Amino acid sequence: MPSAPVAAKAMLHQWEEPCLVGSHGAGCVFFSGCNLRCRFCQNGIISQEGFGKPLTVPELRAVFQSLVDRGAACLDLVTPTHFTPAVAEALGDGEWPVPVVWNSSGYEKPETLRTLEGKVQVYLPDLKYALAEPARKYSGAADYFDWASAAIWEMFRQTGPYVMEGGQLKRGVLIRHLLLPGELENTRRCIDWVAETFAPGQVLFSLMSQYTPQPGAQGNLRRHVTKAEYRAAVAYMENCGITDGYTQERTSAKEEYTPDFDLSGL
C-alpha cells in the first residue's frame, strides 16, 4: 500500500455490535491492505489482493462527513493502521459529532496509537491470539500477542473504562475475539488475559463465532466452528467472570454478511 489511503467501500453497516450501529448503522470505511496475512480473512480481496480506490486526505475527510450526514452512529474505520498518519490528518483536531472507532487487528505499536490520542473515542481491536503457534500458522505473526496486549493497554490508557449512553458506546475499548475451529485453547488463553487484566466494567468483550471457511482453506480451517466449541467458549468466558459484552449467533457465519466491495460511498 502507498502512504496515502486506499479504501474499497464506505457504508452504513448494520452488522457490527449493537452498541455501535444505532438507528441507521455504523459509518464504516473499509481500508485496503493490512499489516497481517490471515489465512482465514473474509475480506481477502481488499486486505491481501489490494483492491481499492486511492484517496487524498481531503477526499477521505469528505467520506467521513458524508457518513455522518447520512446518520451514522459512529465513524467505524476498518483496518486503518497502516494509514495512520493520513487518517489522523483527515480526522483533524476538532471533535466529530459521533464517536470515532478504530477497528483494527490489534497488531500495532503503542507509539502509533499514541498519535491518535484525542482523535479516537472507541477502540475496537481484535485479540486474535494469545498463543504463538496459531498466530504464526494462521497470520504469520508469532509475536502477535506481545504487540496486541501492549496495544490494548495503550488503548485503555487513552479511553479509560467504557461509557454507554442510551445503549450506544460513546467511549472505551471493545475487544473482539474470533473463535477458530480447533483452537479452543487459544480462545481460553485470550479470555484468561482479558479477565486477569481488566476489572468488570472496564472493557467490553465480544466473542465471535462467525468464522467462514475461505477458498483453499486447509486443515481445521476447512470447517465452521461447531456448536460444542462455541458453547464451551461461552461457558469459559462466563466462568471467568466476563459478563460485559457480546456473544454471537452461529448463523452469522455466512458469506452474505461480508460486504460487496464495489467502491461505493467513496
Image (tube, rainbow, N blue to C red):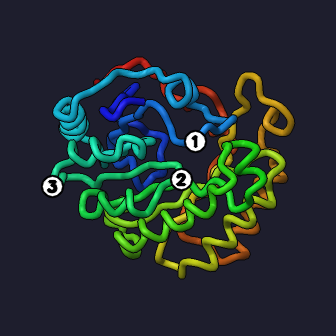
Real-space Cα separation, disc 2 to disc 3, in angstroms: 25 Å
Q: Position of residue 116 (x, y in %)?
A: 30, 58
247 to 254, vertically: above or below: below
Residue occupying the point 39% across, 62% down: 111
Q: Amino acid at mark 3?
A: Asp
For label 1, the SS is loop
Q: Position of residue 232 (x, y in %)?
A: 80, 61
Look at the image and tell me in which quarter the N terminus lies.
Answer: top left
Q: Position of residue 252 (x, y in %)?
A: 63, 39
Give the quadrant of residue 206. Answer: bottom right
Report the residue marked by disc 3: 93
For label 3, the SS is loop
Real-space Cα separation, disc 2 to disc 1, in angstroms: 8 Å
- Looking at the image, which is closer to me, 232 or 8? 8
Look at the image and tell me in which quarter the C terminus lies.
Answer: top left
Report the residue marked by disc 1: 36
- Looking at the image, which is closer to me, 89 or 7? 89
Q: Amino acid at mark 2?
A: Tyr
Pick whichever of labels 1 and 3 is earlier in the sequence: 1
Give left or right: position of 144 versus 99: right
Give left or right: position of 104 versus 5: right
Pick whichever of labels 2 and 3 is earlier in the sequence: 3
Q: In front of the other: label 1 or label 3?
A: 1
**Which label number is shown at residue 107?**
2
Asked if marks 2 and 1 touch (Cβ < 8 Å), the reply is yes
Real-space Cα separation, disc 1 to disc 3, in angstroms: 29 Å
71 to 110, vertically: above or below: above
